[in-house]
Image (cartoon, rainbow, N blue to C red):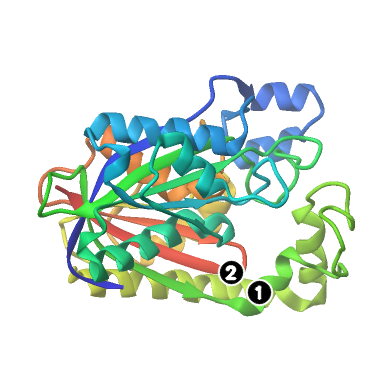
């Protein structure tokens, strides 16, 4: 999406629980094989004792407190998640809005699996641009990958899952100073790959009726055995290139611009980054590949927002410098956000 003017990103917050399970502990406890832990490259995964929406509220309060924005200034509360939020038939975004006291805001859930946080930024941007009176859009993500329903270390190939939440405020950059400026957000989808997370499974009547825990390795293996590996490899490479090229074009920035300081891939395992992301990104861009998340693992829907927060917290962008934040999620969908120092 080409933005007619940059939007502001402020209050960029990541709430990560204190308890950690180190890779060494996971190996010693038989939760993951030593060679797999080495390939993943995570030092530790955060393990929460709070429900995901509770963590989202904590991240959101930090975002509001750091900016001085009050709950009644929020026109929109967008919440995105990947995994179970604590109740079966229930609206987490309404809970978050209520807990914050944002009684005038419109709560909305954004579901695009791991790409949900980036998708929420796109939805929020579109709403703000078409309704300038909306005020601020609060965007939160939160996931808790708790056993027995989810195996955070061995539930998937190429990544392990950490608990945590993110929050940010999207707003007009003309009305208040911003932490970062959003210049473009683009998305590319490959829906023919949805079977990677379905496999050969029949449709169930209730959650986890087909399998007693989420087992993405099993569904991916079934998909690949049916000839899906070639389709995924081709679509992944083509989609990553397309979403980056479109984002740069939408933001009016050349791929070889010296102003493009970083490109930030999702918080996937080290081997996955080295094989699937780094070579393709280096072929397209001279920008430094900034790998983050070695101490968080994959944060589900929160990867993109957490990367934005890290760019801000580390003061990594000087005035006039840009970064591309790449996101990806099952389905499959790839998104890219072009941001700069404010």
Secondary structure beneath label 1 = helix
> Residue 285's image quarter?
bottom left
**Closer to the camera, 155 or 255?**
155
Indicate whether 91 appears above or below 6.
above
Alpha carbons under labels 2 and 1: distance apart? 6 Å
Across and down, in percent, residue 43 comes to 56, 28
Across and down, in percent, residue 173 comes to 15, 53
User: Does the rendering let one see residue 279?
Assistant: yes
Left or right: residue 187 versus residue 209 is left
User: Does the rendering let one see residue 267?
Assistant: no
Indicate whether 164 appears above or below 78.
above
Q: Quadrant of the N terminus?
A: bottom left
Secondary structure beneath label 2 = loop
Q: Which residue is depicted at the point 53% across and 42% down?
A: 95
Please tell me how crowded label 2 is: few (under 14), some (14-19), or many (20+) other residues with Cα within 10 Å.
many
Q: Provide the residue designation for mark 1.
A: 193
Q: Which mark is residue 178?
A: none
Q: Which residue is depicted at the point 20% across and 42% down?
A: 179
Q: Which residue is depicted at the point 32% across and 68% down?
A: 126
Left or right: residue 81 versus residue 24 is left
Residue extending farthest front: 103
Across and down, in percent, residue 272 comes to 57, 53
**Closer to the camera, 275 or 306?**
306
Left or right: residue 211 versus residue 77 is right
Q: Earlier in the sequence, mark 2 or mark 1?
A: 1
- For the residues bearing labels 2 and 1, Cβ distance under 8 angstroms: yes
Across and down, in percent, residue 207 comes to 81, 54
Q: Provide the residue designation for mark 2.
A: 332
């Amino acid at each position: 999406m080409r933005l007619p003017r940059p939007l502001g990103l402020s209050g960029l917050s990541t709430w990560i629980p204190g308890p950690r399970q180190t890779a060494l502990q996971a190996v010693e406890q038989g939760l993951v094989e030593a060679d797999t832990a080495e390939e993943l490259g995570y030092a530790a995964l955060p393990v929460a004792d709070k429900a995901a929406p509770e963590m989202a509220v904590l991240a959101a309060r930090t975002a509001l407190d750091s900016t001085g924005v009050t709950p009644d200034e929020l026109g929109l509360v967008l919440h995105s998640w990947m995994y179970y939020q604590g109740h079966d038939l229930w609206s987490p975004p309404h809970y978050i809005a209520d807990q914050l006291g944002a009684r005038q805001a419109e709560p909305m859930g954004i579901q695009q699996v791991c790409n949900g946080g980036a998708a929420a930024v796109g939805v929020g941007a579109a709403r703000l641009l078409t309704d300038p009176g909306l005020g601020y859009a609060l965007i939160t993500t939160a996931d808790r990958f708790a056993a027995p329903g989810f195996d955070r270390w061995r539930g998937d190939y190429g990544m392990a899952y950490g608990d945590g939440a993110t929050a940010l405020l999207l707003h007009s950059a003309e009305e208040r100073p911003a932490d970062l400026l959003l210049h473009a957000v683009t998305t590319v989808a490959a829906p023919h790959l949805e079977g990677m997370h379905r496999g050969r499974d029949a449709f169930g009547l209730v959650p986890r009726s087909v399998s007693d825990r989420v087992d993405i390795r099993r569904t991916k293996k079934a998909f690949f055995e049916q000839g899906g590996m070639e389709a995924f490899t081709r679509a992944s490479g083509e989609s990553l290139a397309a979403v980056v090229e479109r984002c740069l074009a939408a933001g009016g920035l050349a791929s070889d611009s010296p102003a493009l300081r970083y490109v930030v891939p999702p918080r996937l395992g080290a081997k996955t980054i080295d094989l699937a992301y780094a070579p393709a990104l280096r072929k397209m861009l001279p920008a430094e590949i900034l790998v983050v998340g070695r101490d968080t693992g994959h944060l589900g829907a929160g990867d993109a927002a957490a990367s934005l927060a890290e760019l801000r917290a580390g003061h990594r962008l000087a005035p006039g410098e840009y970064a591309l934040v790449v996101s990806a999620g099952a389905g499959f969908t790839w998104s890219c956000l072009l941001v700069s120092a404010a």
